Image: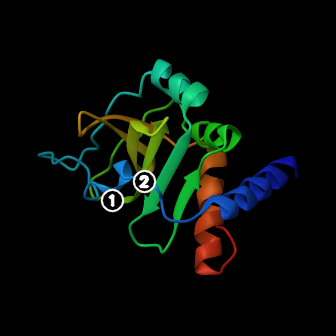
Amino acid sequence: MIQRCFVALLFVSLLCTCGPSPSKDTAERPAPATAPSTTSAAAVEYPSIPLERLEYIFENATYMDATFYNLPISINQSERPQIQSTIASVAQATMPLEAGCKTVGHIWFQVNGKNIEEADIFYEEQCVGYLWYENGKPAYSNMMTEAGYNFYATIFAQVNGQAPR
């Protein structure tokens, strides 16, 4: 029950912050990523993003922006608790990228107007998590926590006018 209340509160706070990003830095959006090519059908794995980098975002991020490629929404957060909740959706475990997994969106974290971390968002049966970039290239991956999965499920369900999966 508490978890449902938390998700509902989080969703309500997002409704107040959804809209176009005022930041010029996020205007240059990378093309949706797919799993790096391999010679077999095996999954590609990247290491987990270093904990120090997540801690830095958690403690210092002043803005978060997420866009979705096939949905008419974006998520913008400028309140530290909202941003920290999003960071809390990053699991410690790595996310193996199965052949054919496609990103549904892209997320940026900023400190005082400067992009400091970015990742593709995956939300498919075999790939649920984040593929983090370093110097413009995929470098790390992390699965999404159950709370993160439920957070996105609620948003997607609201956009599509149906109950969350």
Residue contact between numbered discs 1 and 2, judged by CB atoms under 8 Å? yes
Residue at x 59% of width, y 58% of height: 152
Quarter location, residue 16: bottom right
* CA distance separating discs 1 and 2: 7 Å
Quarter location, residue 103: bottom left
Q: Is residue 54 above or below residue 144?
A: above
Quarter of the image with the C terminus is: bottom right
Residue 126 in sight from this viewpoint: no
Q: Amino acid at mark 1?
A: Lys
Q: Position of residue 164 (x, y in %)?
A: 67, 68
Residue at x 33% of width, y 59% of height: 102
Residue at x 59% of width, y 63% of height: 18
Q: Amino acid at mark 2?
A: Phe
- In the image: residue 26, left or right of residue 158: left
The residue lying toward the viewer, choosing from 71 and 126, is 71
Q: Which mark is residue 122?
A: 2
Q: Which mark is residue 3?
A: none
Quick one: label 1 or label 2, which is nearer the N terminus?
Answer: 1
Q: Position of residue 66 (x, y in %)?
A: 48, 55
Q: Is residue 109 above or below residue 52?
A: below
Residue 7 in sight from this viewpoint: yes
